Image (cartoon, rainbow, N blue to C red):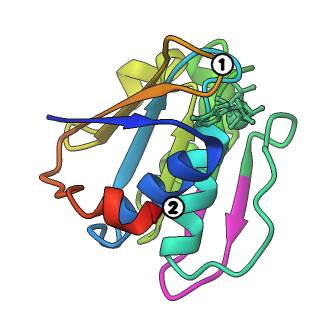
Amino acid sequence: MTEICSSSPVDTEMVGEMLAKELHAGDVIALYGDLGAGKTHFVRGLARGLQVNSMISSPTFAIVHSYEGPIPFYHFDMYRIGNWDELESTGFFDYLDGGGICAIEWSENIENALPDNAIHVRIDKGRDENTRQITIEGISFNHHNLEERKQ
Ligand SMILES: Nc1ncnc2c1ncn2[C@@H]1O[C@H](COP(=O)(O)OP(=O)(O)OP(=O)(O)O)[C@@H](O)[C@H]1O
Ligand SMILES: [Mg+2]
């Protein structure tokens, strides 16, 4: 488990970008955290690290946005998913087998459908407005050069 303190939206993106460097085709990133925690910012960083050159916007209404890159990148927002049938109709299970990388906001809502080897990223609000605690499980991830990158 890796715990990282983020002190700005830019920091959170940078952590995502650094995690992206450790990812491979087929990986699933399950994101957890309240409204406004910073999940979409983290996903923007992931996309940048995966050399996806598109603008990343929240797929709340579409459920999934799909991006081309060296590895296909699928960004889900499961906020509105209430049951298994709804999940299936989004094509989620086909995306899982699609050879890309999936990042899933509101993974709380589809917990039972996540693969066992999913990488878990939890973002918790911290002491003040711009502080976040980021907890990463399921991958070994060296973040010690984050402080250097911030400078
Ligand atoms: N350290 C931080 N990391 C990320 N976001 C931060 C941080 N500090 C403040 N913020 C603010 O918190 C908000 C995070 O928004 P974002 O859309 O990334 O959240 P989200 O978790 O995706 O929300 P939602 O559940 O609505 O999808 C932004 O307004 C951002 O400016
Ligand atoms: Mg979001």
* Disc 1 residue: CB within 8 Å of ligand 1: yes
Q: Which residue is mark 1?
A: 129
**Where is residue 63 drawn, in percent x and y?**
75, 39
Disc 1 and disc 2: Cα gap in Å? 23 Å
Q: Is residue 45 above or below residue 31?
A: below
Res 121 quadrant in image: top left
Q: Given the current orientation, which residue lies at the most extreme right position?
A: 61
Mark 1 Cα within 10 Å, few/some/many (few <14, many 20+)? Answer: few
Q: Given the current orientation, which residue lies at the most extreme front position?
A: 151
Please tell me which residue is depicted at 20% across the width and 44% down the height of the picture: 117
Which region shows up in magenta?
65-74
Mark 2, secondary structure of its residue? helix
Q: Is residue 70 magenta?
A: yes
Q: Is residue 93 magenta?
A: no
Question: Closer to us: mark 1 or mark 2?
Answer: 1
Asked whether 12 or 49 is in front, the reply is 12
Label 1 is placed on what type of residue?
Glu
61 horizontally vs 18: left or right? right
Res 38 quadrant in image: top right
Please tell me which residue is depicted at 42% across the width and 53% down the height of the picture: 15
Q: Which mark is residue 46?
A: 2
